[in-house]
Image (cartoon, rainbow, N blue to C red):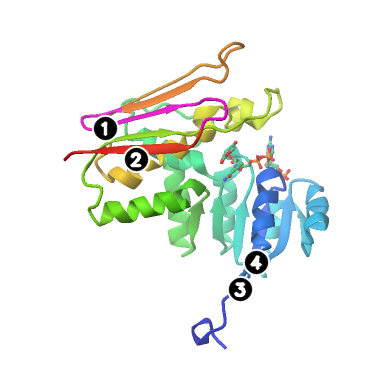
Amino acid sequence: MSASQGQKKIYRWGIIGCGKISNDFALNLLKHDQCRLVACASRDQSAEEFAKKLGVKKAYRGYENLFADEEIDCVYVGTIHPTHKENVIKALKAGKHVVVEEKECDKESILNKYKKKKKRNQLGMNSKEMKECIAAARENKRYLLEGVWTRFFPAVQQSREWFNEGVIGELVCFEGNFGVQMESPSATSRLWTNHLGGGALLDLGIYTLHHLPLWFGERYPTRIVAAGLVGKKKKKIKIFRICGKHTFFSKKKKKNSQDFCHFAKID
Ligand SMILES: NC(=O)C1=CN([C@@H]2O[C@H](COP(=O)(O)OP(=O)(O)OC[C@H]3O[C@@H](n4cnc5c(N)ncnc54)[C@H](OP(=O)(O)O)[C@@H]3O)[C@@H](O)[C@H]2O)C=CC1
Ligand SMILES: O=C1OC[C@@H](O)[C@H](O)[C@H]1O
């Protein structure tokens, strides 16, 4: 029986990178009636432990082995930022649909719109690389999704509906705030290491930035200013601001701050 005749399609997943977010993603995937988690892969033997804990059928050492598995339809890339582009393109070329925690790709493509002098990003992640990922998805006719989960909040979706229906009116201002409680600084943590994509801007900036194309479309602000302070006394402070003709956008990172955004309109 085909899906159109009433039977739900089952999506068979493989997860690469057996760290924190992959664990959280897997726990939710396991609850989904249209998804099966069939394999996981790690650089070393940690996939075996992950598979045992979550009841995953296959554990691979090396991501390539998972990409080559014909039983898998979709790959979740749960590795750290600097590895995303390579893993995404390999998975797409292997014919898999991909969900990736690839937030800095999107962020870079947004930021580059404002940059007069394009500086090379420390991670090697920029709009050029994002375009390569998108091109690989198109070429291989596969779905590519970034893990910007706040986009799917019911409040955001309802606001989008109201906006599209004209209930909100023309937007002139957007202000967003996103904060999380981070683990304590350590030399090995990805969150506190620049070249691993750490810090408030590289790690979390996308959660406020993604609202710009979402709400303003092509009417991007004309100027972007970003500043960060990391020090013994002020390590929690982060200010991020974009200014334009009609728009203003800011992010203040505070310990335990609430995630919020609000808009202003012209009457
Ligand atoms: N959407 C969301 O809610 C969240 C998204 N994230 C995103 O998910 C990604 C992973 O975050 P998280 O799970 O916290 O990270 P982890 O530190 O747990 O690392 C994830 C995996 O990345 C690989 N890895 C770790 N360090 C290195 C390294 N130095 N070099 C190469 N590979 C490495 C490892 O894969 P292996 O197992 O193969 O060794 C590891 O298991 C990040 O991009 C992060 O921004 C994170 C938290 C929440
Ligand atoms: O959603 C998130 O919350 C915690 C962060 O460290 C992570 O990278 C981000 O994606």
Q: Quadrant of residue 183?
A: top right
Q: Amino acid at mark 1?
A: Thr
Magenta highlight range: 243-257
Q: Quadrant of residue 239?
A: top left
Secondary element at tag 1: loop
Q: Name the residue beneath numbered marker 2.
A: 212
Q: Which mark is residue 10?
A: 3
Instruction: Report how far apart the C-alphas of labels 1 and 2 lie in the structure.
Output: 10 Å
The quadrant of the picture occupied by the N terminus is bottom right
State the residue position of label 4.
Answer: 72
**Which label's residue is closer to the chain start, 4 or 2?**
4
Secondary element at image label 2: helix
The numbered mark, 1 or 2, whose residue comes first in the sequence reads: 2
Distance from label 3 to label 4 (Cα)?
11 Å
Q: Nearer the viewer, mark 4 or mark 2?
A: 2
Between 162 and 127, the residue placed more toward the observer is 162
Q: Please check the rendered image and state whether residue 247 is part of the magenta-colored stretch, yes or no.
A: yes
User: Which percent across, then down, holds residue 256?
Assistant: 57, 30
Amino acid marked by disc 3: Ile
